[in-house]
Amino acid sequence: MRRGTRYGALLGPLLAGGATPALVTRAARGLGLPERGRYAVVVLGTPVPDAAVAEGPDADGSRWWWGAAEGSPGEAESREVAVVLLGPAGPARAAARLRELGAGPGGVSPVVGSLAEVGAARRLAGTALLTCEPGSREIVRLDERLPAALLVSRPELSTRLLAEVFGPLLTLVPAERSLLVETLETWLECGGSVGRAAARLGCHRNTVFNRLRRLERLTARSLSRPRELVDLVLALDVLRLSSAPPGRLSSAPP
């Protein structure tokens, strides 16, 4: 794992995207990397821990090169970025290592097949970062967050979705609103089991059932209709990614 002005100067044009073949070749030689290989890009929302920047490969053979890149659309500033030549364990191991080191929040791109593609991978990793909850230390892979990634890529549609699906909830008092949202989240986490959700929430199963029925009436969407359930799940993702907790949301614009 390496870091420094020289490496940053070589990584920067690659991470910006659109690098010429000659530039890719020069960067590969300067960094000691193959032009073709299994690569991923990591983007962190906070400074990289010192423990993450050390000489030598990981236990699985992954090799890391740290630099910085200008923020993508939706990001306010430059980010800590790593190009990772993956070992056999792939990007899942890279994400796990960052969690072990206490890094985060962070996003990990899908695997690309060459250094010439790390610019596109960097943009995807930046999108994955945007799916992390505000204030969290999550390290997430884009492939695990594709629906949420679609939402953060189109914030104007996300705002519209929240207003359309959960608009009536925003008129409730905060405590009541949060209770209904928490019940829906718990029911989903319990695989649609009212009994398991009741046990986790510490209430009677009929209480859970009544809360869910009320939420269906407020949103005009049924939990038993797959397409309408998708609306509710996506609206929950928008709520999760909001900078304000559910109890502090105000009505979205119509």
Image (cartoon, helix red, strand yellow):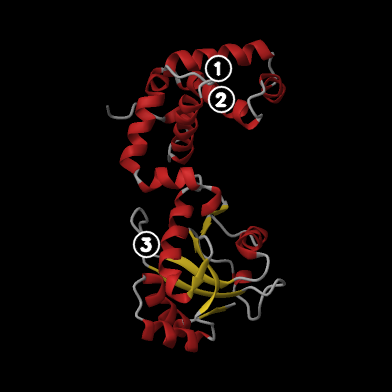
- Labels 3 and 1 touching (C-beta < 8 A): no
In the figure, 241 relative to 50: above or below?
above
- Labels 2 and 3 touching (C-beta < 8 A): no
The nearer-to-camera label among 3 and 1 is 1
Q: What residue is rendered at 42% in x and 16% in y?
A: 220
* Label drawn at residue 184: 2
Which amino acid, by three-letter code, is at mark 1? Leu
Quarter-wise, where is residue 199 in the image?
A: top right
Q: Total number of numbered labels?
A: 3
Identify the mark nearer the N-term, 2 or 3.
Answer: 3
| Quarter that holds the N terminus | bottom right
Identify the mark nearer the N-term, 2 or 1.
Answer: 2
- Labels 2 and 1 touching (C-beta < 8 A): yes
Label 1 packing within 10 angstroms: few (<14), some (14-19), many (20+) = many
- Residue beneath disc 3: 71
Q: What residue is rendered at 53% in x and 52% in y?
A: 143
Q: Position of residue 254 (x, y in %)?
A: 27, 27
- Residue beneath disc 1: 212
Q: Position of residue 155 (x, y in %)?
A: 34, 43
Looking at the rendered structure, the secondary structure element under dot 2 is: helix
Q: Position of residue 125 (x, y in %)?
A: 47, 59
The nearer-to-camera label among 2 and 3 is 2
The reply, left or right, for residue 30 in relation to residue 22 is right
Which amino acid, by three-letter code, is at mark 3? Gly
Which amino acid, by three-letter code, is at mark 2? Leu
- Please indicate, yes or no, whether residue 113 appears anywhere in the rendered image: yes
The reply, left or right, for residue 135 in relation to residue 207 is left
Q: What residue is rendered at 70% in x and 26% in y?
A: 200
Quarter-wise, where is residue 160 in the image?
A: top left
